[in-house]
Image (spheres, rainbow, N blue to C red):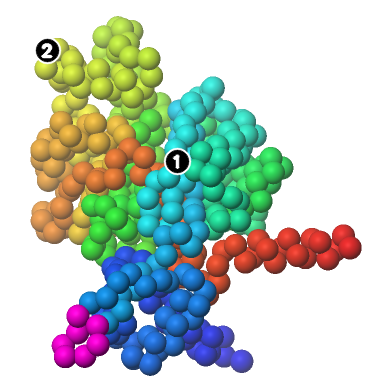
Amino acid sequence: MDPTRTTARDIRRRNRSTLLSTLFFQAPLSRLELSQVTGLSAATVSNVTAELVEERLVVEAGLVESDGGRPRVLLRVDPGYGHVIGIDVGETGVRAELFDLAMRCLATVEEPLSSARPQANTVATQVAAGIREVLAAAGVGHDSVLGVGIGVPGMVEQGPPVLVHAPTIGWSAADLPGLLRKHGVRLPLFVENGAKTQGQAEMWFGAGRGARHAVIALVGSGVGAAVVTDGAVYRGANSSAGEWGHTTLVYGGRACRCGSRGCLEAYVGAEGILDRYRQATGGRAVAGTDEVASIEALIAAADRSKRAARLLEETAAYLGAGIANLINLFNPERVVLGGWAGLALGTRLLPQIRAAAKAQALAYPYGQAAIELAQLGPDAVAFGAATLPVAALLTGDTDPRQSRRAARTRRVARTA
């Protein structure tokens, strides 16, 4: 059999995905509008939407007047069909958020990490607790959850098993899903690099929306990027593409947490910025109880301190040079600067960052690229992680929960 031959099931899955995705992003729409937007025939739209309504995935959302005929029924994805959980395993804490299918946040919990290099099992314990807490806070049962998306600060080897390689926090081939199973988590799990989950969030609902070629940059304690080419996130041969923070900015330069020297992260990541300030002041640290507070204090101090102002100018130049490299390499329509530190720096320094990027990038690709701030705020990693199970629902022909139920049935059968 020709492996490239399109089957009737392939066509059905593609049509279902097209209509469901259109309703998710553009609803409410009538069946006529769905046909016009997607290019599918009226008969196909009618048949597929009838199935989606029968599954209670799609519901009616009112009526709209038609030209001379009966009012048309509007459709939308039912926000209450299921729930999704997004987890941000950051370098300073774990954040868990629960959403309905309208992507409204229903509950949030956040807990700091006890160490800068936490054991994977310790993080799994906190993630499992966060899942339980957001479900309890919203009064939502496990059976309503389509899945849990988890954004992590490292490279994700999409197994099986799914393994996390995060040298900056001391992880090498950590089986995070396996550890979560040991902690009693039985929900479908989707693990991805945190910059990529932020990237998906910004592409779906934020500053990247409408672009086909974009780079979403995450600057926090560490630095990463999601590269979007022709609407899809580029992952590379082993899902490690996007480690922008570990591209070399200064050969033989400052030591980086990854073990190399001269990485971009060592100059523009929050930890690197604060360490550069300590070196410039002979060991004097910036005020603040954590990195977030310290970066805020440093930015505020720039109005009265020439040393702080000069350090921020240098940081804008380094960040602009890093963005210029992205523009030269990937020719994006849009570069979106996000992450909590990226937003803090960009709010004050975006004109300087753009000027530095312009000075370092090739003129033609720079002229085609807009450099903008992310729109979804510092919790975009968790929000984006929650979109991972939604994407599985939109692109698949089954509910992600069905595979979990099937696996449970097989386990019961084996033990009977």
Magenta highlight on residue 70: yes
Q: Earlier in the sequence, mark 1 or mark 2?
A: 1
Q: Position of residue 285 (x, y in %)?
A: 32, 10
Specify start and end residues of the magenta stretch as a single range: 65-71
Q: Is residue 66 left or right of residue 168?
A: left
Q: What number is the disc on residue 304? A: 2
Q: Is residue 416 left or right of residue 278?
A: right
Q: Residues within 10 Å of mark 2 (few under 14, many from 20)?
A: few
Q: Nearer the viewer, residue 272 or 181?
A: 181
Depicted 287 relative to depicted 384: above or below: above
Disc 1: which residue:
107
Instruction: Check the picture and name the quadrant holding the C terminus.
Output: bottom right
Characterize the magenta stretch by its predominant secondary structure: loop
Residue type highlighted by circle 1: Ala
In space, the residues marked 1 and 2 are separated at their CA atoms by 40 Å
Depicted 309 relative to depicted 362: above or below: above
Of tags 1 and 2, the one toward the viewer is 1
**Residue at position x 32%, y 82% from top?**
31
Q: Position of residue 399 (x, y in %)?
A: 55, 67
Q: Residues within 10 Å of mark 1 (few under 14, many from 20)?
A: some
Q: Nearer the viewer, residue 397 or 32?
A: 32
Q: Is residue 230 left or right of residue 391?
A: left
Residue type highlighted by circle 2: Arg
Label 2: state its secondary structure: loop
